[in-house]
Amino acid sequence: MNKVKIITDSCSDLSRDLREKYDIDYAKMYTEYEGKETPASLDWDIYSPGELYGIMRDGKRVLTTQVPVQEFKRIFTQYMDEGCDIVYIGCSSKQSGSVNTGFVVAKELMSRHPGNEIYVVDSLNACLGEGILAIRAAEYRDRGKSAKEINDLLNKELKTVNEYITVHSLDALKRAGRVKASAAFLGNLFGVKPILVSDKNGDQVPIKKVKGRQTSLNEIVNLLKENIVNPEEQTVYIVHADCEEEAKELEKLVKEQIPCKDTHVSYIGPIIGASIGPDAIGLFAFGKEITFVAGN
């Protein structure tokens, strides 16, 4: 059996410590600002979180791109040349075109490398929802599972990823076209905070709205507490868009209310951050199967 390499992309928001711990690599997307494209590094080695989110706090929009074809070819070929089979866990096809591009590139490269396989998994998630599926894939690899076995197991677990995110302001969502300008104005005026989830089809959508920042933090903890499965066996992942002190507060709430094995706090990366905006904050863990569908 070939060695297995787990690859994800810039939307996974896996920090360096997690990628190194689980031996995961990622394909880079790009951000675009003032006509300049820059690789979306999860290590923040091109610009800092404060710089990216500062641009957005000034009311400006940062654009994003999917993983380019050449980047897929580079990273897939690198590990195929090392004799690896690959499992690529990509951002939800409802939120990025990268998975579809990955399928096309994988098919082309496998025809040239008949001894290696590439499995492309549509995570139906983004941010650390995608990231914890990559971690789960790495854990399966380390237990001796083949690339095909990992692919099959992940596809049974996609809808058990539980995501609860809230935002401080609706401005970034308005600029990204996710809410109407009028709704954003009124929401900000009255302190409305949407709770966002990935629904069963992979769309990131509001599941409910609450009033006030502290209420929204309490609510995402309550939602995870109600839906997490076997918390004592899990790490709860906390992400934030340049609001570290609130992330620490949220971590404290999690530890007080959810008997989880561990917690991990990290930044929301450049791609997700460009869409959701500064001061977004959220929780991720495995839990009850997601059945919610936007619009139903």
Image (cartoon, grey):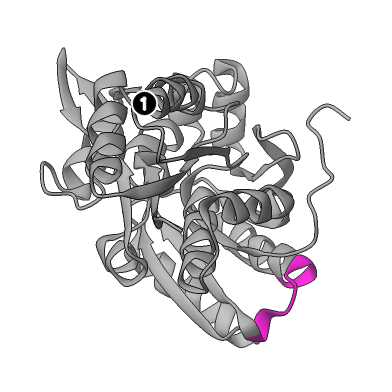
Q: Which residue is mark 1?
A: 109
Q: Is residue 286 visible?
A: yes
Instruction: Indicate whether 156 appears above or below 113.
Output: below
Q: In the image, what residue type sits under mark 1?
A: Leu
Left or right: 120 in relation to 223: left
Q: Give the residues drawn in magenta, as a range.
A: 225-232
Q: In this view of the protein, which residue sits in the foreground, 149 or 32? A: 149
User: Horizontal and vertical percent for residue 273?
Assistant: 37, 40
Q: Could you tell me which residue is drawn at 36 percent across and 63 percent down?
A: 266
Left or right: 108 in relation to 195: left
Snapshot quadrant of residue 201? top right
Label 1 Cα neighbours within 10 Å, binned few <14 / some 14-19 / many ≥20: some
Q: Residue furthest top?
A: 35
User: Horizontal and vertical percent for residue 129?
Assistant: 55, 52
Q: Residue furthest right?
A: 296
User: Horizontal and vertical percent for residue 126?
Assistant: 52, 42
Q: Is residue 258 visible?
A: no
Number of marks in the rendered image? 1
Q: Is residue 258 magenta?
A: no
Q: Could you tell me which residue is drawn at 62 percent across and 55 percent down?
A: 149
Q: Quadrant of the C terminus?
A: top right
Q: In this view of the protein, which residue sits in the foreground, 144 or 289? A: 144
Q: Could you tell me which residue is drawn at 73 percent across and 63 percent down?
A: 223
Instruction: Indicate whether 56 appears above or below 221.
Output: above
Q: In this view of the protein, which residue sits in the foreground, 130 or 47? A: 130
Q: Is residue 228 magenta?
A: yes
User: Horizontal and vertical percent for residue 16?
Assistant: 25, 61
Q: In this view of the protein, which residue sits in the foreground, 21 or 173? A: 21
Helix, strand or loop: magenta stretch:
helix
Q: Could you tell me which residue is drawn at 59 percent across and 17 percent down?
A: 180
Q: Secondary structure at mark 1?
A: helix
Instruction: Indicate whether 225 appears above or below 179.
Output: below
